[in-house]
Amino acid sequence: MKKEFELKCGSLTTQWLVIKDLLKEGNLSPETLDLLDEMLIYLGEYTLKGYKEIEDVMIELWKERVWYSIENYFKLPEIDEPIEKSGILF
């Protein structure tokens, strides 16, 4: 049986609060991006399982929060720019 993905900070809400604090401090380190990536993986798994809410928050709202944070704080590669040149590793 496949083991469920676990977040470093325990719960989605806790991880989100840690990320918010890191972003407010201007901490745009790879570790901060890793925490956001973890949330996307977690949310993707629970979306595939059919969940609509996690921790009393609509899953679509969680996705928007994470995506907007990545989009607003980290340089995403242009559509035709190779990922290797952008500096972002996925």
Image (tube, rainbow, N blue to C red):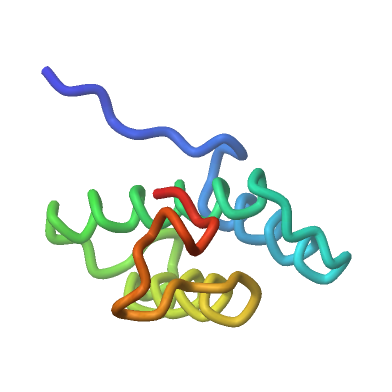
> Which one is nearer the viewer's eye here, 26 or 59?
26
User: Where is residue 81 shown, x and y percent of the image?
Assistant: 37, 72
Residue 80's place in the image compared with 42, above or below, is below
- Name the residue at 55% across, 46% down: 34
The quarter of the picture where residue 58 lies is: bottom left
x and y percent of residue 89 in the render?
45, 49
Residue farthest to the right, as pictured:
25
Q: How many marks?
A: 0
Closest to the observer: 37 or 54? 37
In the picture, which quadrant includes the N terminus? top left
- In the image, 18 versus 25, the foreground residue is 25
Query: Residue 57: percent from the left, percent from the top?
Result: 43, 72
Question: Which residue is drawn at the image coordinates 43% and 79% (left, top)?
Answer: 64
The x and y percentages for residue 87 are 54, 56
Residue at (57%, 73%) from the top-left corner?
Answer: 75
* 70 lies left or right of 54: right
Q: Measured along the vertical axis of the image, is residue 53 above or below residue 61? A: above
Describe residue 75's horizontal placement relative to residue 18 as left or right.
left
Residue 46 vs residue 57, the one in the foreground: 46
- Find the residue positioned furthest to the top: 1
Answer with the quarter of the image where residue 74 lies: bottom right
- Quadrant of the rendered image containing residue 61: bottom left
Which residue is painted at 72% across and 51% down in the image?
29
